[in-house]
């Protein structure tokens, strides 16, 4: 290989201007109208996270008293929420913590999460620079417009921080292999501990430094020392950032047991969960990028076995397979569980474009056709997810059926009433209404709703309900009177929502 061809293959000089453009696109999609949809489009998970942060602010008790997740997500959002409260106090919006509604904190929390999403794009670029600048730009660009990641970055939940820390762990694991020092592996362990402190599933990130340690050429100290440094740092980081694991041991054990039970639940068995995830990945990427991902994955397997770059290829290939094997065991597929693997998929697709086309040098194909092919593949890979991100951004500003329902509720229902909401089809602000979230209205009888002082029912479409669940729901609704119905149309997308009052 000539020196010119080597420069073309490696291409390690960063393209700062194009990276800035990529980050600008990523920020635009993620920061677009963060306050739109409040209060009716605050989903249950967002309300749970911000609600617990608000409880910590009001009580001064830093124990979240809930262990369905370790707790770092609350500490991340706590300074942001405090800053929003102080700004509101200076503006005269409220005079005490009792006067701040949860929905006021959500836009700032969403902006913070969006910035974390943009940070993940930066990390993907840095990871892929190990292959080359053009590889890195394509991978970063693909993540910047990925609809699945864009949508998650607009929700104040733990999914995007988990993805950030997992990608950071990948980057630091590669750095640790390159430096081959216990300190470098300890930093990779810290990143794994951060992922673990966000979500129990984040413990899978620890596989990255352990795999890098195992593949690092033995020297002084040994590979065992590298592995122990990573594990020890991860454990210390987790305990520092989720201290109530130990300080409230009974609460943690009960919460973790509940989380494990939910993880293994087969209430709605889905033997083809693995296929659901593949379909969701195809929707997020589009066919061209998915085929490039498959090609990059095949290339990664070959390079992980034969080289060159065995370690970086092994890490990129093994972790998505490990994550996919774990989440495919869930009874009810959760597409957000795919997010930590999305940066890996972008790196594989970016490598398929550049490294795959570079293989054509063996056939003495001139550089100009190869450059044209790279441009065509790049456009083919980025165009479908870009259009998907644009369509998502347009849907964000659409006046949905939930928005119409909220306007009717705000104008016609007196505050303080207790309302049962089916499948979180709409969010009702806690300072106005007492919402009882149920998976299906038919899960309880009309008498049980009355016993719980529920007088209103908000139900979604019945198309996807099982026949027995539909019958139970109809039995409840026979004892209720329809007040309003909001059907979707081209100008008002969303599910059909109906509001009933129990007789």
Image (cartoon, helix red, strand yellow):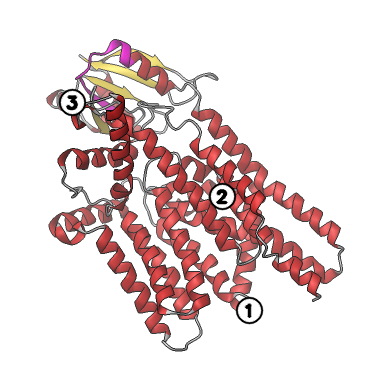
Residue 349 location, x and y as percent?
Answer: 63, 57
Disc on res. 158: none
- Report which residue position mark 2 lands on: 143
Residue range in magenta is: 409-421
Question: Is residue 410 located in the magenta-colored stretch of the structure?
Answer: yes
For the residues labelled 1 and 2, say whether their Cβ atoms are less than 8 Å apart. no
- Report which residue position mark 3 lands on: 449
- Report which residue position mark 1 lands on: 306
Q: Secondary structure at mark 3?
A: helix
Task: Locate residue 371 relative to residue 273 in the image: left or right.
Answer: right
How far, Cα to Cα, is label 1 from label 2? 28 Å
Question: Is residue 420 located in the magenta-colored stretch of the structure?
Answer: yes
Residue 381 vertical position relative to residue 489 in the rendered view, above or below: below
The quadrant of the picture occupied by the N terminus is: bottom right
Seen at 38% across and 83% down, the residue is 224
Residue 331 vertical position relative to residue 243 in the rendered view, above or below: above
For the residues labelled 1 and 3, say whether their Cβ atoms are less than 8 Å apart. no
Mark 3 crowd level (few <14, some 14–19, many ≥20, 10 Å Cα): many
Q: Secondary structure at mark 1?
A: helix
Res 398 seen here: yes
Q: Tell which circle, 3 or 2, labels the residue nearer the N-terminal end.
A: 2
């Amino acid at each position: 290989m000539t020196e010119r061809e080597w420069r073309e293959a490696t291409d390690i000089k960063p393209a700062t201007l194009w990276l800035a453009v990529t980050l600008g696109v990523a920020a635009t999609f993620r920061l677009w109208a963060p306050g739109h949809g409040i209060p009716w489009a605050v989903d249950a998970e967002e309300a749970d996270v911000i609600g617990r942060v608000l409880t910590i602010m009001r009580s001064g008790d830093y124990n979240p008293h809930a262990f369905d997740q370790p707790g770092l997500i609350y500490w991340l959002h706590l300074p942001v929420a405090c800053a929003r409260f102080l700004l509101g106090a200076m503006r005269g919006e409220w005079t005490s913590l009792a006067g701040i509604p949860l929905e006021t904190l959500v836009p700032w929390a969403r902006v913070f999460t969006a910035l974390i999403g943009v940070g993940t794009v930066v990390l993907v670029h840095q990871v892929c620079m190990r292959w080359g600048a053009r590889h890195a730009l394509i991978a970063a660009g693909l993540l910047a417009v990925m609809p699945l990641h864009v949508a998650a970055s607009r929700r104040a939940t733990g999914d995007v921080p988990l993805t950030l820390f997992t990608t950071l762990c990948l980057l630091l694991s590669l750095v640790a292999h390159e430096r081959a020092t216990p300190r470098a592996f300890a930093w990779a362990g810290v990143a794994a501990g951060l992922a673990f402190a966000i979500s129990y599933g984040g413990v899978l990130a620890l596989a990255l430094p352990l795999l890098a340690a195992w593949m690092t050429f033995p020297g002084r100290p040994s590979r065992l020392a590298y592995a122990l440094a990573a594990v020890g740092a991860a454990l210390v980081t987790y305990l520092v950032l989720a201290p109530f694991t130990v300080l409230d041991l009974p609460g943690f054990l009960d919460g973790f047991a509940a989380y494990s039970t939910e993880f293994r639940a087969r209430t709605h068995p889905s033997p083809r969960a693995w296929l659901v995830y593949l379909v969701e990945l195809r929707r997020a990427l589009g066919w061209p990028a998915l085929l490039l991902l498959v090609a990059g994955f095949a290339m990664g397997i070959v390079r992980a076995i034969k080289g060159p770059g065995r370690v970086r290829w092994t890490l990129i290939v093994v972790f998505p397979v490990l994550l996919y094997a774990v989440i495919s065991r869930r009874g009810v597929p959760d597409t957000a569980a795919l997010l930590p693997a999305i940066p890996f998929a972008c790196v594989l697709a970016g490598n398929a474009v550049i490294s795959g086309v570079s293989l054509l040098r063996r056939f003495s194909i001139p550089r100009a056709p190869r450059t044209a092919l790279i441009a065509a593949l790049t456009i083919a890979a980025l165009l479908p997810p870009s259009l998907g991100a644009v369509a998502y951004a347009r849907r964000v500003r659409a006046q949905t059926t939930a928005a119409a329902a909220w306007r009717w509720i705000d104008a016609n229902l007196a505050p303080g009433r207790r309302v049962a909401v089916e499948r979180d089809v709409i969010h009702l602000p806690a300072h106005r209404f007492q919402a009882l979230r149920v998976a299906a209205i038919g899960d309880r009888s009309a008498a049980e709703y009355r016993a719980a002082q529920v007088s209103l029912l908000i139900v979604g479409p019945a198309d996807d309900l099982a026949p027995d669940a539909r019958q139970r729901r109809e039995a409840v609704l026979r004892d209720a009177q329809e007040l309003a119905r909001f059907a979707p149309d081209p100008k008002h997308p969303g599910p059909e929502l109906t509001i009933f009052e129990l007789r």
